[in-house]
Image (spheres, rainbow, N blue to C red):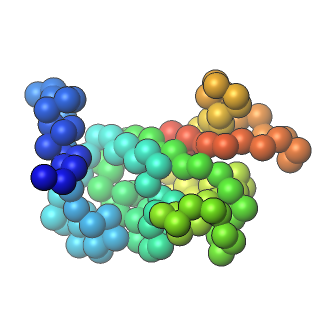
Amino acid sequence: MGYLPIKYARGAYHHPHSTFKEADITDSSLPEKLGEFDCIVSFETIEHVAEEEQFLANVFNMLKPGGTLILSTPFGKGRGKPCGSPFHVHQLTVEEFMDLFPDYTLSAFYFQNGPLIKPAEHDEDMHFPLGIAICRK
């Protein structure tokens, strides 16, 4: 039997107010199929998706007004550049990542700095392995 992430999530993280669903995030009809959510969490996903614009449009359209997106990704050399992972389409730069959320009313960014995740204090000379965006629609 293969790994079943939804079954695992339902068992390990069950809460009566939580829902776990599996679908193709690049399906343009996904917002109609799944509806709207108060919060969408996407950890370490976007770097695997070639259709990044459709992914982001779907997430935005599935958030209720005032809803929150929490999205993280590892950083790398940017779009169209090899990143060393056969499973990643690309790894965005800090600047590319921060430019993904123009339609949100509020966006806050956090970067991994050693073992800590800290609010964005971007310095061109600093390298961050990971970024997190928390965005309000």
Write the residue at 29% across / 40% down.
Answer: 38
Q: Nearer the viewer, residue 6 or 110?
A: 6
Image height check: is 41 above or below 119? below
Mark count: 0
- The picture quadrant where one finds residue 118 is top right
Please give left or right for residue 49 compared with residue 36 in the image: right
Q: Is residue 28 above or below residue 90?
A: below
Kindly tell me whether residue 112 is visible in this rendering: yes
Which is nearer the eye, 61 or 88?
Answer: 88
The x and y percentages for residue 130 are 62, 42
Instruction: Give above or below for 29 relative to 1.
Output: below
- Image quarter of residue 20: top left
- State the residue lying farthest toward the right: 125
Residue 122 spot, x, y in % from top left: 78, 40
The residue at the point 19 percent across, 66 percent down is 32
Q: Nearer the viewer, residue 29 or 20?
A: 20
Horizontally, residue 128 falls left or right of residue 72, namely right
Q: Residue at x 40, y 65 (%)?
A: 55
Picture coordinates of residue 50, whole percent (x, y): 47, 73
Residue drawn at point x = 65 percent, y = 63 percent: 83
Residue 18 lies, with reference to residue 81, above or below; the image says above
- Residue 34, image x, y percentages: 18, 58
Can I make out residue 21 in this image?
no
